[in-house]
Amino acid sequence: MSSELRLRDGSFVRNVPGTGDQRPPGRYVSWKQHYLRSGERQWPRHCSISNCKERADGGGHVQIKGHRNGVYIVPMCDKKHNTAQNMEWLRVKQGTAALRVDNVDENGWCVIV
């Protein structure tokens, strides 16, 4: 079973290096599709990073500041925030839903926690 966190305004996330080639589990073709699988979660129109009005293009693999373990998927724009070069701590918008995923299995698929 996966775990979801609703982040408060003022929470910070940071991209996880080396996750760009990871594929979502099962038959999902995108992290967005995986994120929406429960039907209870909605994909935001805009990036989850505070003050960003860019379209949320993809699911960024992030760490959450203050959470020791775990990688989470957060909707982000590919233009500025969901990039391997951006390793800054980024403040998220109130109520951002972060879906936890774990490491990659032997086939290169991310494993849901």
Image (cartoon, rainbow, N blue to C red):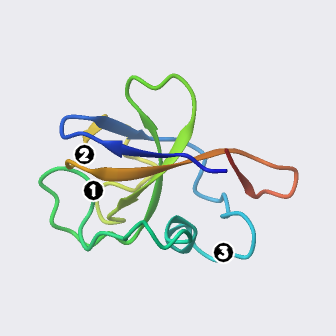
Q: Amino acid at mark 1?
A: Ser
Element on which disc 1 rests:
loop
Q: Is residue 78 above or below residue 16?
A: below
Q: Give the residue at mark 2.
A: 92
CB atoms of marks 2 and 1 within 8 Å: yes
Q: Give the residue at mark 1.
A: 48
The numbered mark, 1 or 3, whose residue comes first in the sequence reads 3
* Mark 3 crowdedness (10 Å alpha carbons): few <14, some 14-19, many ≥20: few
Element on which disc 2 rests:
loop
The numbered mark, 2 or 1, whose residue comes first in the sequence reads 1
Q: Quadrant of residue 46?
A: bottom left
Q: Give the residue at mark 3.
A: 28
Q: Is residue 80 left or right of residue 31?
A: left
Q: Is residue 76 left or right of residue 20?
A: left
Q: Residue at x 61, y 50 (%)?
A: 2
The numbered mark, 3 or 2, whose residue comes first in the sequence reads 3
Q: Residue at x 58, y 56 (%)?
A: 20
For residue 72, the mark is none
**Extreme residue in the right direction:** 106
Q: Quadrant of residue 88?
A: top left
Q: Is residue 14 above or below residue 24?
A: above
Q: Is residue 25 visible?
A: yes
Q: Residue at x 56, y 71 (%)?
A: 37
